Each structure stands twice: as structure tokens, then as C-alpha cells.
Image (tube, rainbow, N blue to C red):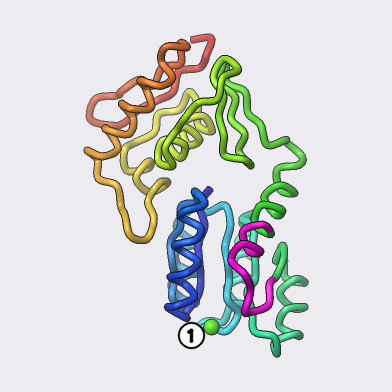
Amino acid sequence: MRVLIVEDDGVLADGLIRYLQQAGYGTLLAGNGHEADLMLSNEEFDVVILDLGLPGLDGVEVLRRLRARKQQVCVMIITARDAVEDRVLGLDRGADDYLIKPFALAELEARLRAILRRRMASTGSEIAYGPLVLDLEARRATLQGEPLRLTAREWQLLEFFVLRAGKMVSKSQIAAAISNSDNDPSQTSIEVHVSRLRAKIEGAGIRIRSIRGFGYYLERPAD
Ligand code: CA
């Protein structure tokens, strides 16, 4: 899951990034409203954690623009206690939930899971792919009914491949999808992660094919 954190308070932002990365989310930071608007226009995220009081463009305007572009990303507003009207306005404009500062990071993560669960309720959070089953909410995979032990990076890669099964994906698409604020993966490190992931799943007949000079694709189980 890829999270954009929009927060101009550096200390709070650092805490959020550390906590969510440890919980297995990919995180990117925007420190002001214009930066957030630009990133949301150009990249895909699963969730936006949006502060309302921002320099430049405020959070309500960022949200208004996001929804005007018909983007379906989940939005969690974080705001100061005295901004009650802003909060109501935010929910009217299409935020999924809000939290009042200060909040416990565990509470934020629990709310994020609840939002994502609601969002996935229509499709269910499990994806079966031949002998491989991914639980997107719990971020766990099983292979032939046995738990598959994956690093955070390998999980991100596997989720990315399975959601795009049968389609070619370039190394730069992969890098963008699994990057986070303090660690942009190089092409070489992607190759290393892919080869480790392969070793864990190919015994069960699931193949990640290389396309020379471009990237990869995950073969459909019946291919
Ligand atoms: Ca702020």
C-alpha cells in the first residue's frame, strides 16, 4: 500500500513515516499543498494522510482538486482541534475519515486499515492467483496453503505483480511503486528483490518473466 503524507510539521511527518514504514506501507511526503497537488496529479497512491493547515494551498483545496479529478484514493484528514468547521467541510468534500491532533500513531494506523477494508469490501481483500493467495488487507500471502515468508519489499513487489498479472511492467514503474521517502530502489536492487521473490514462488509454477531491457511480467497461472 502506498501512502502520501501531506504534512508541513517536520517532526510529526518524520514520526508518521517511520511508523507507517515499519507497518509495511510505502510512504512519500509532501511538505506543502502545491507539492501534494502535483504529486497526486502525477502518481498513484492508495491513501492520502492530509493535514488541513498547510502553507500555500490548504488541505481542503488539495482535497477539492483531488475529487474534481475524480481520483478514488482514500483520504484521511488530520487536523487541529479548533478546526471543527474545516473537518466537516473536509468530509463533505470526500474525505473518508479524520483524526484530531494530537493522536496516537497506532490509532491512525487502525483507522487506515478500517478505511482500506471498507474500500475493499466490495471486492474482498483476497486475491487468488493459481496456488498463490494474497490478503491485501493483512499483507500476507500463502502458497499452496502454506504461509509465504516475505520481506516488506518482496511483499510490495508481489502485490504489484499480481495486481498487474499478464501485463508488462517496466523497472521504473516498479521503482516508483515501491519507493519511499528515504529509499529509492535502484534498478539493480529491484533485480535482486525480484530474483529472491522468484526463488520463493517459482517452485509452485508461478513465473516472473524478464523482458530484456524493459522489465518483467507475471505469467498467468494457465499460460
Ligand atoms: Ca499544518
Q: Which contiguous range is marked in magenta?
A: 99-110
Instruction: State whether residue 145 is above or below residue 190.
Output: above
| Residue behind label 1 places its C-beta within 8 angstroms of ligand 1 | no
Image position, residue 199 (x, y; %) = 35, 20
**As drawn, 6 above or below 136:** below
How many marks do you count on the picture?
A: 1
The reply to whether the magenta stretch includes residue 101 is yes
Instruction: Say above or below: 207 vs 1.
Output: above
Measured as percent of width and height from the top left, residue 36 is found at 48, 70
Q: Is residue 77 above or below residue 53?
A: above
SS under mark 1: loop
Task: Choose between 201 and 3: the one closer to the eye.
Answer: 201
The reply, left or right, for residue 177 in relation to residue 85 is left
Nearer to us in this view, 9 or 19 = 19
Q: Position of residue 17 (x, y in %)?
A: 46, 63
Q: Type of residue at label 1?
A: Gly
Spot the residue most to the bottom.
82
Instruction: Report which residue position mark 1 lands on.
Output: 56
Residue drawn at 68 percent across, 72 percent down: 99
Q: 203 or 215: which is nearer to us?
A: 203
The part of the image, by quadrant, that contains residue 82 is: bottom right
Taking the spot 50% from the left edge, 31% from the top edge, the residue there is 164
**Residue appearing at x 37%, y 60% in the figure:** 181
Residue density around tag 1, few if under 14, some if 14–19, many if 20 or more, within 10 Å: few
Residue 128 x/y as whole percent: 62, 23
Name the residue rendered at 43%, 75% in the picture: 31
Taking the magenta stretch, the answer to whether it contains residue 180 is no
